[in-house]
Amino acid sequence: MDWTDLTEGAKAVLEQTRNVKNDKVQIVEFDVGFVQSQEESGDKEPISIQEEDYQNLKRYTKENTYGEKYHMARNKDIVKLILLETGKIPDNLSEIPVFREYKKKVEEE
C-alpha cells in the first residue's frame, strides 16, 4: 500500500510518526471520531480522523511498501500508533511519552 492510497486523516497521523528525533520512540495517540476545530488548525485544513481513516491506517501499517514497522493498539475509540525503530515493540510502552495527541475534548457540565 502506497502513501497515495491513504486518507487525509491517516496521512495526518502518520506524518507525526515521521518526526522521530534522537532515536527516541514516539507515540501518536488519537480518538476515532476526532475533528480538529478551525481555531486549532489555523490556516491549514482541519484534521479529521474517522473510522475510515483508522481502517486505512490499519491496512497501511500491515502492507506499506516503505519498509517501516508499526505497532497499533486500539481500546474502544482510543488508538496508539508507534513507529518501531528496531522492528520490536518496546518492553514498557507506558514509559514512552505520547508525542502527539488528536483527542476529543471532554465537555464539562
Image (spheres, helix red, strand yellow):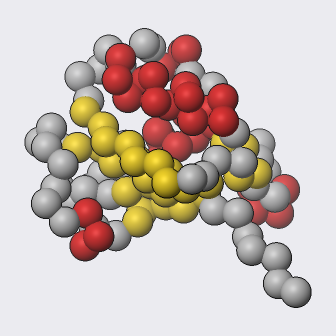
- Rendered residue at 57%/35% (across/down): 54
Which of 31 and 44 lies nearest the eye of the viewer?
31
Residue 39 appears in which quarter of the rendering?
Answer: bottom right
Q: Classify residue 32 as left or right of residue 106.
A: left
Regarding residue 30, the answer to whether it shows in the image is: no
Residue 87 appears in which quarter of the rendering?
Answer: top left
Q: Classify residue 2 as left or right of residue 103.
A: left
Q: How many marks?
A: 0
Q: Residue furthest right?
A: 109
The x and y percentages for residue 63 are 35, 17
User: In the figure, 75 relative to 105: above or below?
Assistant: above
The x and y percentages for residue 84 are 23, 43
The x and y percentages for residue 98 are 40, 66
- Rendered residue at 49%/54% (across/down): 75
Q: Classify residue 14 as left or right of residue 78.
A: left
Which of 3 and 94 lies nearest the eye of the viewer?
94
The quadrant the N terminus occupies is top left
Regarding residue 15, the answer to whether it shows in the image is: yes
Q: Classify residue 4 as left or right of residue 108.
A: left
User: In the figure, 104 relative to 86: above or below?
Assistant: below
User: In the figure, 108 relative to 67: above or below?
Assistant: below
Which of 41 and 100 lies nearest the eye of the viewer?
100
Q: Residue furthest front?
A: 76
The x and y percentages for residue 53 are 62, 32
Residue 8 appears in which quarter of the rendering?
Answer: top right
The quadrant the C terminus occupies is bottom right
Q: Residue furthest bottom?
A: 109
- Rendered residue at 30%/51% (across/down): 20
